[in-house]
Image (cartoon, rainbow, N blue to C red):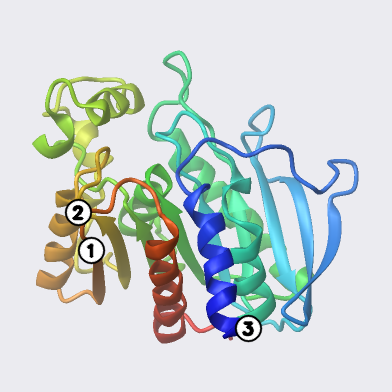
Amino acid sequence: MFRIYHLIVIAAALSVTLGKKERGSSIISKKLPVHHSIANGRGYTEFSDVQYGSAEGTDNLLDVYLPDNRTDSTKVIVYIHGGSWVHGDKKELPRLFIDELVGRQGYAVATINYRLVKNGQNIFPVQIEDIRNALTFISGYAKEYRYCPDKFALMGASAGAHLALLYAYSYDSLKQVKTVIDIFGPTDLADPSVRAQGLESNDIIVNYLGTADTAATVVKKASPYFQLRKSSGVPTILFHGTADELVNVKQSEKLYKKLKELQVPAQLELYPGGKHDLPPQIAIDVFSKIIAWLKQYYPAV
């Protein structure tokens, strides 16, 4: 009964945060970036607002959550927030989700900010550069803080899921990414399902890429579907609502089909009538399946 209640509380948090605009200020003081918490009877340490890159403001900040019982083999999960590549914040990942992943499951978790598109600046691929810099930064401190330096799971929602997939399939030259968790992310930025005139998704993608030409080279370069190869594919789990009004469900179905054709381990979870959010009844299922997936393809130690 406790377990069910625990998942319901987490689901409530997920339903109002993933892929939405940033939340209010952190409960952790920016002047006191180190904080110790107890979750599920186990402690972990939080490092808040750590600068990992040279971008100004908050664009290159990350938060890190390290379990007290970690070892040199403790795996790291990196969460990439959503927000149409124009808004969002690393605080999007609910605290109760972090409590579960770090306090109960024993993972190290990092949540990152990245440069956002604004007034024609910071268009693709600067977000990929930020992800690479964040992973390099995290790896560089592995020996000092005790966690695995060269293995990552990337997890994201919406635009963040797109970045996680794209980085894993096309930009991970060191082969550090071992699995991707994709929550309703766009995968083919040329597909009519998201590029028809009048669609909100079309305007968002044009703003992100800096061009309206669906045949432009950059469109395929920025599309996980086109960058996926058998040699670059990693185990991938996808979650999508069939009535998603922003990112058409065909985006996940298309990528899943290619993953299976390439014999890359993949799982597609579809939610009939689900939209571009995670209401509690869906979030409970999503969360439990993420944990099961991680245990199979990316155990904590």
Residue where numbered disc 1 is placed: 270
Q: Nearer the viewer, mark 3 or mark 2?
A: 2
Q: Quadrant of the N terminus?
A: bottom right
Q: Is residue 107 above or below residue 159?
A: below
Q: Is residue 75 above or below residue 61?
A: below
Q: Earlier in the sequence, mark 1 or mark 2?
A: 2
For mark 1, give the secondary structure.
strand
Q: Amino acid at mark 3?
A: Ser
256 sits to left or right of 72: left
Please say if the residues under marks 1 and 2 sit with CB atoms less than 8 Å apart. yes
23 sits to left or right of 207: right
Do we see residue 174 in this rendering? yes
Residue 212, picture quadrant: top left
Residue where numbered disc 2 is placed: 242
For mark 2, give the secondary structure.
loop
Q: Position of residue 102 (x, y in %)?
A: 66, 73
Q: CA distance from mark 3 to mark 2?
A: 38 Å
Q: Quadrant of the C terminus?
A: bottom right
Question: What residue is shown at x 51% (from left), y 56% (from top)?
Answer: 14
